[in-house]
Image (cartoon, rainbow, N blue to C red):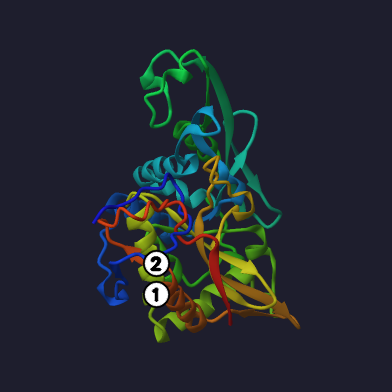
Amino acid sequence: MKKRTIMGGLAALFIVSCQSTIIIRDPDAVNIRYDEPSKKALRIAVDNGVFFSLPESLTEDFNTVEASLSCRRVTQPSWIKALSDYLSDFTMNPSLYGKFHVLEFKKGDTPSVQVQEDLDGARTLEIIYSKSETRSIIQTLTDIPCSTSSMEHIGKPLRAVYFQYPSFAEVQRALEQKDMKKKLARFEVNKDFFKFMADRLTIFRFSPELAFEMNAQGKSLLSSFSETVGAQMKQQPLKQLDYWLAEMTEIGFATQNFKIFTLKKDAELTNGMKIENAEKYSRRTDEFGIPTPFVSYSSERGDFRFSSITSFERCLGELRTKYKRFIAGSDSLNMDSRFFLYPGYQCKD
């Protein structure tokens, strides 16, 4: 089977009636081998109670080389390799995880590292990265960033955009000045779900609301969610989620790359698969979105409600019947794999 690669993201793959050979894999048959070093590195972070703040704007930052809007080369999102490198270094220095609660990526003017501390002692390690550009002139056909043998680009401007991150040595220096982090109730969680995700190279997206928003009993949203989903997992195996995480990895990502899972606020308690930055999607400029499985919560009368795992699994099962894998050999379909899952799919609880 031919694999179609997307540089860091997936978009929707629509199957039309003329496709002759279509398969839908049984979730029970999923047997993908995720990159073991990456899985181990992410699991160590989870075991040490570290969360990751990954703003949606981060997923827009691709390294690109561009001759024109129709002639450009895009690599995987810059943060994926940066995070992979940091996790690898932390694995060699695991005691540093004892110095902070949250690792956050932020864009700034120059690469740097800062450690922010809340009034109650919650600590955030800020990885500040920057955008850079270079401009040159196309000299040879090998300089052209698209599949063409045309000489029309020779002598034309070439623009490269890339992102720079601070070194781990800078991270280490910033953390070594700090004492060990405090044990805080709002970060005390049931780790079962987060471990499940880490074993599939999927990062639970942290946001300030998850730790600061409290119910009437003073329990944080993060703690409430982890306990709820942890209990539901024992009754409802996550076969459909497991299937889609494997599918996203196999079709669109190298096995060492990371995916994101989101908990968002929604009074209707929707769940499913959303596309990051879908409103900015442009096939012409390769600005495709990232598929992100999600569940939601609402806050009513001093307590939290969450879309159920049963509903989430049912929704992803329905999605599996609507977006099907394809087998190579049907040249009549020149499908663009960036359309895989676009524009997403959601259900109500």
**Residue drawn at (34%, 43%), measured in percent from left and top?**
92
- Out of 276 and 86, give the one closest to the viewer: 276
Which class describes the residues within 10 Å of circle 1: few (<14), some (14-19), or many (20+)?
many
Secondary structure of the residue carrying numbered label 2: helix
Which quarter shows the N terminus?
Answer: bottom left
C-alpha span from label 2 to label 1: 6 Å
Determine whether, in the image, residue 43 is placed left or right of residue 303. Answer: left
Front one among 16 and 233: 16
Query: How many marks overall?
Result: 2
Residue 188: x percent and y percent?
54, 68
Numbered tag placed on residue 8 in the rendering: none
Q: Which labelled disc corresponds to residue 244?
A: 2
Residue 55: in sight, yes or no?
no
Residue depicted at 41% across the width and 47% down the height: 6
Asked if the residue under mark 1 is in contact with the one under mark 2, i.e. CB atoms within 8 Å, the reply is yes
Q: Position of residue 242 (x, y in %)?
A: 37, 70
Q: Which amino acid, by three-letter code, is at mark 2?
A: Trp
- Indicate left or right for 69 with 242 as reference: right
Please name the residue that numbered disc 1 is placed on: 240
Judge by depth and name the residue closer to the eye, 219 or 12.
Answer: 12
Element type at mark 1:
helix
What type is the residue that disc 1 sits on? Gln
Residue 156 in the image: state x and y as whole percent.
52, 16
Establish if 104 lies above or below 232.
Answer: above
On the image, the x and y values in percent for residue 214 come to 69, 72
Question: Image height check: is 341 above or below 147?
Answer: below
Q: Residue furthest bottom?
A: 235
- In the picture, the quarter occupied by the C terminus is bottom right
Front position in the image: 185 or 12: 12
Q: Is residue 105 left or right of residue 236?
A: right
Q: Residues within 10 Å of mark 2 (few under 14, many from 20)?
A: some
Taking the spot 65% from the left edge, 29% from the top edge, the residue there is 109
